[in-house]
Amino acid sequence: MVDRGNNCFHGGTYTVATMPPASHYTGDMIYVSDGPKTGEEPDAGTGNVAFSDGTNWHFLATYEDPTP
């Protein structure tokens, strides 16, 4: 959800294990509290934003597919 008055994005917060199906959220972004950044282990991240292309979620900092 975008707050147009403040130009802020307010998405949900998930873990890799609780991310919703990407196909239900095409074009949306979410915060993944244990999502990895570049150089972090896939299952031990410190948090990252992911976006849905309609098929998969992709982390912004790595463009990796976070689906376990």
Image (cartoon, grey):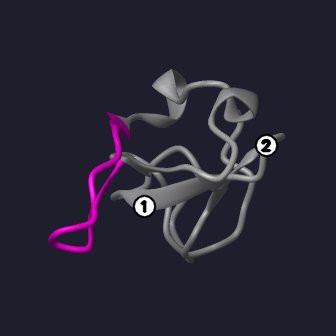
Q: Which residue is depicted at the point 33% across and 46% down? A: 33
Q: Is residue 62 left or right of residue 45?
A: right
Q: Which residues are magenta?
A: 1-13
46 in relation to 25, above or below: below
The part of the image, by quadrant, that contains residue 47 is: bottom left
Q: Which residue is mark 1?
A: 48
Name the residue at the left extreme: 6
Rate crowding at label 1 as few (under 14), some (14 to 19) or many (20 or more) other CA atoms within 10 Å: many
Q: Which residue is depicted at the point 69% across and 35% down? A: 22
Determine the CA span between mark 2 and mark 1. Answer: 19 Å
Q: Is residue 55 left or right of residue 67?
A: right
> Residue 63 in the image: x percent, y percent?
70, 69
Q: Quick one: SS at disc 2?
A: loop
Q: Which residue is depicted at the point 34% across and 46% down? A: 11
Residue 6 among those drawn in magenta: yes
> What amino acid is at disc 1?
Asn
Q: Main secondary structure of the magenta part?
A: loop
Q: Quick one: SS at disc 1?
A: strand
61 in relation to 29, above or below: below
Q: Nearer the viewer, residue 6 or 45?
A: 6
Q: Nearer the viewer, residue 3 or 65?
A: 3
Rate crowding at label 2 as few (under 14), some (14 to 19) or many (20 or more) other CA atoms within 10 Å: some
User: Could you say which disc has been placed on residue 54 in the image?
Assistant: 2
> What amino acid is at disc 2?
Gly
Q: Is residue 39 left or right of residue 55?
A: left
Question: Of tags 2 and 1, which is closer to the observer?
Answer: 2
The part of the image, by quadrant, that contains residue 41 is: bottom right
Total residue callouts = 2
Name the residue at the front extreme: 5
Please identify the quadrant where the C terminus is shown: top right
64 in relation to 7, above or below: above
> Residue 56 in the image: x percent, y percent?
77, 43
